[in-house]
Image: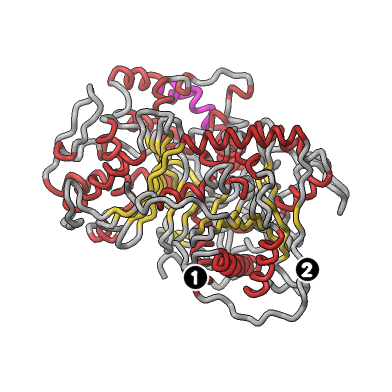
Amino acid sequence: MGRWRFLLPPWGCRRAPGSRAPFPLWGQPPVPRAAGGPVALGAVEPFPSLQGPPSRCLASSFPLPRQPVPPLAQTLERYLRSLEVLVTPEELEETRELVQEFGAPGGEGERLQAQLERRAARMENWLSDWWVQSAYLESRLPLAVHSSPAVVLPKQDYSDWRGQLRFAAKLIAGVLDFKAKIDQQALLVEYRGGHPQCMAQYSSLFASCRLPGPKHDGLLLPVPGRRAPTFITVVRNFQFFQVEVYNSDGTPLTVDQLHLQLQRVRGLSWKTDKEPLGVLTGDHRHTWGQAYSTLMRDRLNRESARCIQHSLFTVCLDAPVLKVSDERYPSRVAAQMLHGGGSYSNSGNRWFDKTLQFILGEDGVCGVLYEQAVADGAPIATIIDHVLDYCKDPDTARAPMTPLPLPPKLYFYITPEIQWDIERAKQNLDILITDLDISCFTYRGFGQGLPKRWGLRPDSLFQVALQLAYYRTHGSLCATSEVVSLRRFHLGRTDAVRPAAPPGAAPGPGHGYAPRPGNPPRAPRPGRGDAVPAAGGGGISERQDRTGAGRAGHRPAPAGTEAGGHRDGQRLPGIFMDTAYAIATHCRLLTGQVASRSDCLMIYGPQVPDGYGVCYNPLDAHVNFAITAFNCCRETHAQRLARTLQQVLDQLARLLGENPGSTDGEGGGDVEGQP
């Protein structure tokens, strides 16, 4: 059945035998309170760590394997191989000496490796907590652009606010239908490469939120065994509303009932002079953390903010945006989903801390913005596929005659201090949005079907294309990070592949690709052999990471609370002070594939100021691409890289015997949305 296989027993992850009790929570420590009592000011309500039993729907008849700790020698060997095209031979030799010293018997490497193995022996997943803590909660960059990805859904068949509300009602009903499958343990276990995937993330998707802090953030997650909230938040014209989505008997509202409530929200939010309080959540995390403390001093603000945080999810009813040319339309829609378009547009219609936000415009555009400290892209894609299928054939149950209450509006008391915080956040967010360069397009020369016919991994072929396009654009190679899933392991999240460059370092002189000056070139291979070894080499690195053997998992070790020597007052190993380590971890290409049955596209910002963020969704006959860069860097240009990538894909198509089409000039594949 493709991605899915049906299992009769309930699905999920079982606690590994002999595992300890749940470990402390991420972020701020929980503050104890009396049963049913109020939460202390600024406190984080207790929630289960992902190291504990996730929820009632996560019992399974089979245990998933624990994530292994990669062998140190293998990690060091792969680290050196990845540096071969990034540094000069002299720099590589200096790094080799540091690596040998680090990995010597009885050295620092063995000591840190032993600490990792002890951690892995007593924890259900030794990496996930560190990954969430270091990659997300400790980051002080704004969630908008820098952290939270957006998914652009296919354009819907409506063009006014009436169609917007009608589709929003069906979308909400579809999300509630998916949530019911989670609650009833009726979801199908996901399989990838023949391996069952950990389903623990689904229990935290709803009624969860990120909580800001001045130094690091925390997470609000649903408490197992406690009744889930029965409401969502809807925001329009910068005004938030609490909308109940269940009847008193526990049944979800019908599409007609939801449509009625959304009409009421529209009638209550006609004013357009409200302060865009939501832009605060898109500011730098330390700034928002300080403003959050100020905001929460008032009881009215606390009640409204906690309503948003505890709601199942948020629906954003965006106002109309300016028309753009057909060429720029895909990029404009992607920008609207990623950051809202600015304080003058729809950025105030967001609460960027919220795990799930569904965005609907009046012109048929729609999408999803999600906070990835709680969930990764694959579960989000699963929800999207389900919701879009549901919207095509929604449940037509007859609405009960019981009258529904008006959705209450969530009010905030804006003091002069908070007003100043809002103005500063508006300025910072507008600067960030202006700095972002976006190029989205659909390449129709071929899809994932062509490489599969040649026995190649589609993802590996697209990674080779990206490397080659980058080289043609900038004349050099760069460190690349590809996000891959580790959900085949118990409580697995994601990791970052550092594609091994030597196997694809020289597809041949005709491809305009050569190793770094000073390194001897590999002998070119004639014909189709040029591309086949390159595509295979990238697949080896990806498979190693998905099986837990990737070297990226070792990288958080110096920053870990136990294996990090510098946090214990010890000297940081020299290998992590080396210039080559900084080069290897400065990933100018942040790439990722989020496959979905729907014709959608994910987008996120670059990882570094002088880099690119590239996400793609390969379908059978075409591939959707989103490329981002920052205008502040003169070297990067999203549209130029997009044009070069199209030419590379055309060349690879011809190399594999496919005619991508014919147009004037170089590169014949049809590209939609490319200026």
Q: Are marks 1 and 2 in contact (CB under 8 Å)?
A: no
Q: Look at label 1 and name its amino acid.
A: Asp
Q: Earlier in the sequence, mark 1 or mark 2?
A: 1
Q: Which residue is mark 1?
A: 389
Q: Is residue 135 left or right of residue 630?
A: right
Q: Look at label 2 and name its amino acid.
A: Pro
Q: How is the image coloured?
A: secondary structure
Whether residue 627 is situated above or below residue 157 in the rendered picture: above
Question: Looking at the rendering, which quadrant does residue 630 occupy?
Answer: top left
Q: Position of residue 134 (x, y in %)?
A: 57, 35
Q: Position of residue 512 (x, y in %)?
A: 19, 36
Numbered range of the magenta stretch: 99-113
Q: Position of residue 74 (x, y in %)?
A: 39, 35
Q: Nearer the viewer, residue 27 or 98?
A: 27
Residue 289, disc: none
Neighbour class for label 2 at 10 Å: few (<14), some, many (≥20)? few
The magenta stretch spans residue 290: no
Q: Which residue is mark 2?
A: 405
Q: Is residue 201 left or right of residue 540?
A: right
Q: Residue at x 77, y 75 (%)?
A: 403
Q: Main secondary structure of the magenta part?
A: helix
Mark 1–mark 2 Cα distance, whole angstroms, equals: 30 Å
